[in-house]
Image (tube, rainbow, N blue to C red):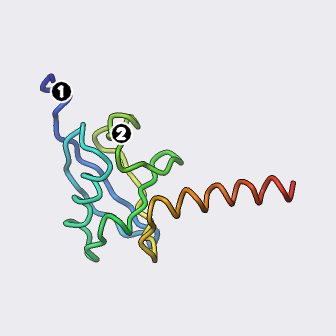
Amino acid sequence: MTQEENASISLTVKTTNDERFQITVSSNATVLETKKAIEKSSSDNIEPDFQRLIYKGQVLKDDKSLNDYSVQDGHTIILVRSRHKAKKEETSKRERESVFFVVVIV
């Protein structure tokens, strides 16, 4: 791993109520690690399970790295707070049902 691949990057986190704050993470951090950094830095201490991160219109997946999404130093990510802790199995079932529902209506 080169030094550049392991460099720290500073990100702006913008919430849906327009609050902004900075976090610093490794450029190869996973999305889950980034969520943990957000939990520590946010005024609400939002647990990772209640966070959805959006970057360039994409919902970021916990097991992917920031490098996978080409997140760079100085960029902004959007934090959406979930009201309920979603289980991965329930989410994927809902997504399948939603797709089916859309197909039926169309």
Q: Position of residue 51 (x, y in %)?
A: 38, 64
- In what quadrant of the picture does the C terminus appear? bottom right
Task: Specify the quadrant of the image occupied by residue 22.
Answer: bottom left
Q: Position of residue 87 (x, y in %)?
A: 44, 65
Name the N-terminal-most of marks 2 and 1.
Answer: 1
SS state under label 2: loop
In the rendered image, the vertical position of residue 83 relative to residue 15, given as above or below: below
Task: Specify the quadrant of the image occupied by residue 86.
Answer: bottom left
Q: Residue at x 18, y 26 (%)?
A: 4
Q: Residue at x 32, y 49 (%)?
A: 31
Which amino acid lies under the numbered mark 1 shown in the image of this protein?
Answer: Glu
- In what quadrant of the picture does the N terminus appear? top left
Q: How many marks?
A: 2
Which amino acid lies under the numbered mark 2 shown in the image of this protein?
Answer: Val
In this view, the residue in front, 12 or 79, is 79
- Image-based side of 45 in relation to 88, left or right: left
Q: Which residue is mark 1?
A: 4
Q: Which residue is mark 2?
A: 71
Q: Residue at x 30, y 44 (%)?
A: 74
In the rendered image, the vertical position of residue 87 relative to residue 55, given as above or below: below
